[in-house]
């Protein structure tokens, strides 16, 4: 059987190597869950100890169908955004776009995989045009056949490439391992480390080997890792519409869900700013920063008139954020320096603190219907140690006095020199 038509069976579903309808969404959902700590996905280590892998739970198989493949020219005509499943005709569509777009230098790949022929054909187009390949989120299975043909092969810090072996469906739906020689040859011809290729092609179809960025570079899968400020944002590549943008915003800043019923203009303003920046080629880093600053401004404005007991509880929350140790310590300190709104809208807010924030916002009064577009730089900076001491001192006071002392710490004005002086 030709490599491109290889199928394996999972229950009553027939699934192409890498991905297809049901399992495509299942494994993609599993990958999202693995990245975001949601859903029944667990980590393991592949048999050769080369890289971590994840196993996709049976409960994820019945997901909705994958969205159609979207191929679009990015801002300034220098990027192509490809997002979705690699189904019949995708490579041909891409070829037509490239023929009409001579300035394209780079292709953004966001795909759960699909047909082997399509992945290989896209890879051939990439190689012929000398394009840079870039993965801003995930590129799995057959998608990796396209990625490895790039002149440069770049991944966003935190993005994931997923590998596993092809399987065919045998009698009675039995999974039979297929000859992976064509895929092995393609990976080796692209210069990948043989031990890595061996490990990747031993992984079952219901598992994914997801190496970290350092391993990808060491195995010559990727040539470099870039930060979120390097290239135009690709977060909306599979759906640059208001509903998709809103979904992304609420996923990344979950506390905003508490504002939607009471202040829909806040979500609408952030969504429109986000969509406009995506169309203009704003980087993902700039987009995330801007979304959080707009959200922080709205949240702080709503909580400024909170009851004293609520202010005290939020002061304790802020102090807990500053007292935590670990890789997020600097982010927590920077957020606290900008005020309570930044603390509540940053990533990594734990579920108990998020529940507290949501409860406070349910009783908040919104005085600003729509936040203004954010400044390109942080609102302010404060000494973290001094701020911690000031919060500790304020929280030691009787409740009503504590709320008064906390107010300028949690809701700083644009000039914050007096806060550092209070903390000393």
Image: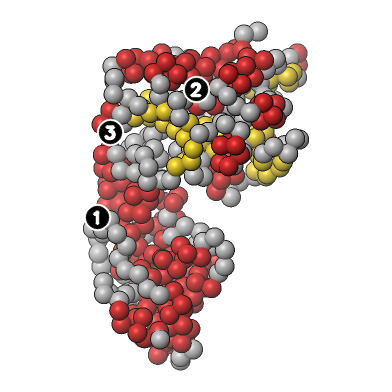
Say the numbered circle drawn on residue 149.
2
- Element on which disc 1 rests: loop
Mark 2 → mark 1, Cα distance in angstroms: 40 Å
Residue at the disc numbered 1: 373
Among numbered discs 3 and 2, the one appearing first in the sequence: 3
Q: Nearer the viewer, residue 286 or 40?
A: 286
- Element on which disc 2 rests: loop
Among numbered discs 2 and 1, the one appearing first in the sequence: 2
- Element on which disc 3 rests: helix
Q: Kindly tell me whether residue 202 is visible in this rendering.
A: yes
Mark 3 → mark 2, Cα distance in angstroms: 23 Å
Image location (x, y in percent) of residue 118? 50, 16
Give the class, few, some or many, for how many residues have Cα within 10 Å of label 1's Cα (few <14, many ≥20). some
State the colouring used for the structure image: secondary structure
> Which residue sits at x=67%, y=26%?
194
Instruction: Indicate which label's residue lies in the foreground, 3 or 2.
Output: 2
């Amino acid at each position: 059987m030709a490599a491109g038509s290889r199928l394996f069976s999972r229950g009553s579903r027939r699934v192409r190597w890498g991905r297809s309808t049901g399992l495509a969404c299942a494994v993609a959902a599993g990958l999202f869950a693995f990245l975001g700590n949601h859903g029944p996905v667990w980590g393991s280590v592949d048999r050769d100890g080369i890289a971590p892998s994840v196993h996709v739970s049976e409960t994820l198989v019945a997901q909705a169908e994958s969205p159609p493949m979207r191929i679009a020219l990015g801002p300034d005509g220098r990027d192509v955004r490809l997002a979705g499943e690699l189904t019949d005709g995708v490579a041909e569509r891409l070829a037509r776009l490239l023929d009409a777009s001579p300035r394209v230098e780079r292709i953004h790949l966001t795909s759960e995989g699909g047909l082997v022929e399509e992945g290989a054909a896209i890879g051939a187009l990439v190689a012929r045009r000398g394009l840079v390949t870039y993965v801003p989120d995930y590129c799995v299975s057959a998608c990796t056949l396209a990625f490895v043909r790039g002149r440069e092969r770049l991944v966003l810090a935190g993005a994931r490439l997923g590998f596993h072996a092809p399987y065919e469906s045998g009698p009675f739906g039995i999974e039979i391992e297929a000859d992976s020689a064509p895929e092995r040859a393609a990976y080796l011809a692209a210069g990948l480390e043989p031990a890595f290729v061996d490990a990747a092609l031993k992984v079952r179809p219901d598992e994914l080997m997801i190496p970290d960025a350092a391993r990808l570079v060491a195995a010559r899968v990727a040539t470099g890792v870039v930060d979120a400020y390097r290239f135009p944002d690709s977060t909306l590549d599979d759906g640059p519409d208001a509903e998709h943008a809103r979904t992304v915003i609420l996923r990344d800043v979950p506390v905003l869900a508490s504002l939607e019923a009471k202040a829909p203009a806040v979500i609408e303003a952030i969504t429109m700013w986000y969509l406009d920046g995506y169309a203009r080629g704003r980087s993902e880093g700039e987009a995330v920063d801007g979304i959080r600053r707009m959200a922080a401004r709205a949240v702080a404005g709503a909580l400024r008139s909170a009851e004293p007991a609520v202010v005290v509880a939020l002061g304790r929350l802020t102090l807990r954020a500053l007292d935590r140790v670990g890789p997020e310590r600097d982010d927590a300190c920077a957020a606290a320096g900008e005020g309570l709104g930044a603390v509540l809208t940053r990533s990594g807010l734990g579920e108990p603190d998020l529940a507290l924030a949501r409860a406070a916002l349910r009783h908040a009064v919104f005085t600003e219907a729509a936040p203004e577009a954010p400044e390109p730089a942080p609102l302010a900076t404060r000494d973290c140690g001094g701020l911690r001491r000031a919060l500790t001192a304020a929280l030691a006071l009787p409740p009503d006095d504590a709320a008064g002392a906390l107010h300028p710490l949690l809701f700083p004005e644009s000039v914050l020199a007096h806060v550092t002086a209070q903390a000393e």
